[in-house]
Image: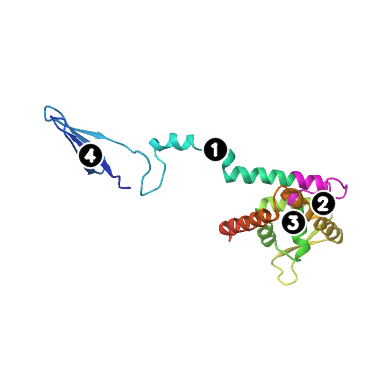
């Protein structure tokens, strides 16, 4: 139970006010010397929990602006990146049907072979259900294989087929163009700063 610090005002007959402190109630003294207790409830923010309280909610709601919130800005930036990705890779029939998530898996498998589902999910920052559905589609296109690990038969590993490797190499060769288009409005220094800040942000949350 958090401790609430509250101001107590004793209203005397001659209207002289005295300020004291109590934990929960206002105590008033009427002209007939009757003592009246009034629960003050919660005002502003409780120091122990840091939770927003009713009296402060309206003011905080008024000062909230969606377009200035980092979550909204990152979502819009992601939309811009996807739009540029589609423009770059949509020009060729070979790459037109590749999604950004498939790109992440293919390019990661190009860098490393014999990856487990868990490791591939970690490197691509995907949850397991999403990854499994994506791998199913890549298997249907004969771009990846899933087989028993030669080092440990308890596990399955994922690799690119020859066709998948050739496609991944082609995708990676044009990947820089997507980045350049996304960052085009920024100066070289701003691009470097943005990359460094995002790297620290992700590392701070994901390790």
Instruction: Pick the residue in front: 194 or 10.
Output: 194
Q: Which residue is mark 1?
A: 65
158 left or right of 35? Answer: right
Residue shown at the point (61%, 56%) measured from the top left: 197
Quarter of the view holding residue 154: bottom right
Residue 105 is marked as 3
> What are the residue bounds of the magenta stretch?
83-101
Q: Nearer the viewer, mark 4 or mark 3?
A: 4
Q: Quadrant of the C terminus?
A: bottom right
- Comes first in the chain, label 4 or label 1: 4
Cα gap from disc 3 to disc 2, whole angstroms: 15 Å
Q: Which residue is mark 4?
A: 8
Relative vertical location of residue 111 with respect to residue 72 in this rendering, above or below: below
Residue shown at the point (72%, 72%) measured from the top left: 151
Element under label 1?
A: loop
Residue 168 is marked as none
Q: Nearer the viewer, mark 3 or mark 2?
A: 3
Element under label 2?
A: helix
Asked if residue 79 can be seen in this view, the reply is yes
- Here the colouring is rainbow
Residue 140 is marked as 2
Horizontal and vertical percent for residue 119? 67, 62
């Amino acid at each position: 139970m958090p401790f609430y610090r509250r101001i107590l005002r004793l209203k005397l007959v001659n209207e002289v006010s005295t300020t004291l402190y109590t934990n929960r109630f206002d105590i008033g003294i009427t002209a007939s010397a009757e003592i009246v207790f009034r629960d003050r409830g919660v005002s502003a923010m409780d120091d122990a929990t840091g939770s927003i309280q009713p009296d402060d909610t309206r003011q905080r709601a008024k000062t909230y602006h969606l377009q200035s919130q980092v979550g909204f800005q990152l979502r819009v930036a992601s939309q811009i990146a996807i739009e540029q990705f589609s423009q770059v890779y949509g020009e060729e029939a070979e790459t037109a049907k590749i999604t950004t998530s498939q790109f992440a898996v293919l390019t990661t498998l190009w860098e490393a072979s014999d990856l487990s589902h868990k490791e591939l999910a970690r490197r691509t920052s995907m949850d397991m259900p999403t990854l499994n559905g994506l791998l199913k589609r890549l298997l249907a296109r004969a771009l990846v294989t899933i087989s028993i690990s030669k080092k440990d038969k308890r596990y399955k590993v994922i690799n690119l087929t020859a066709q998948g490797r050739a496609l991944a190499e082609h995708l990676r060769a044009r990947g820089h163009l997507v980045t350049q288009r996304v960052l085009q409005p920024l100066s070289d220094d701003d691009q470097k700063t943005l990359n460094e800040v995002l790297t620290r942000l992700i590392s701070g949350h994901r390790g």
